[in-house]
Amino acid sequence: GGLMLITNYISTIAILLTARAFAQEQCSASMSFSQHEFTLPAMRRGCHLVTDKIIKEIGPSVRQYRVGLAHFFLQHTSASLTINENADPDVRTDMETGLNLIVPEGSKAPWVHTAEGPDDMPAHVKSSMFGASLTIPITNGRLNLGTWQGIWLCEHRDRAGGRSLVVTLQG
């Protein structure tokens, strides 16, 4: 009784460890990565649909993945990335309006950090609200966004330069 139970337990552990080692070997043998760095052009303050600009830069590489992930990292602290509505541009206008209502600017704003201009600290706050990175699944060589979803670059400064983006693909 007890010896048989222990023997079955040890056999089960050995099978699981073998299966796990095989899965790791298969995964690492077939996993590939690529990375792209590029600059999105300078844009006026507001939320901008940039999906097509990004696909232009990474599309040929994305098409090589049947299943994977695309990680997007914006190398800036006063702009952000988010996924939102891709059809009606009024949504982007309304989002900028909402952000400006939530995060105060100007002489009545409570910010201590003002050395880089009155729009800088509010830009940092807005950037932290949305974040500087996104991860999107890749399915059959395409970013697997929903029908009405697009990638937005939200520019939170009044006058900013181009924005550097690092995209890492894995699958």
Image (cartoon, grey):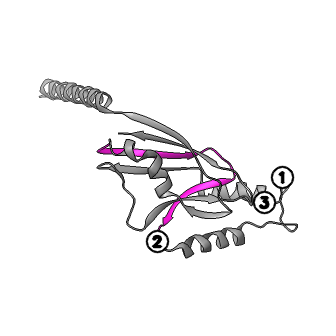
Q: Percent position (x, y) of residue 97?
A: 66, 73
Query: Along the polypeptide, which appears first: circle 1 or circle 3?
Result: 1
Q: Amino acid at mark 3?
A: Asp
Pointer 3 residue: 119
Pointer 2 residue: 87
Marks 1 and 2, how far apart at CA: 37 Å
Q: Residue at x 61, y 70 (%)?
A: 95
Front-most of 109 and 147?
147
Q: Residue 111: say if magenta.
A: no
Is residue 21 positioned above or below 55 on the image? above
Marks 2 and 3, how far apart at CA: 28 Å
Pointer 1 residue: 113
Front-most of 42 and 76?
42
Is residue 21 positioned above or below 160 on the image? above
Q: Residue 78: say if magenta.
A: yes
Q: Residue at x 84, y 62 (%)?
A: 110
Residues rendered magenta in the picture: 65-87
Mark 1: give few (<14), some (14-19) or many (20+) Cα within 10 Å.
few
| Residue 109 in which image quadrant | bottom right
Instruction: Give SS at disc 3.
Output: loop
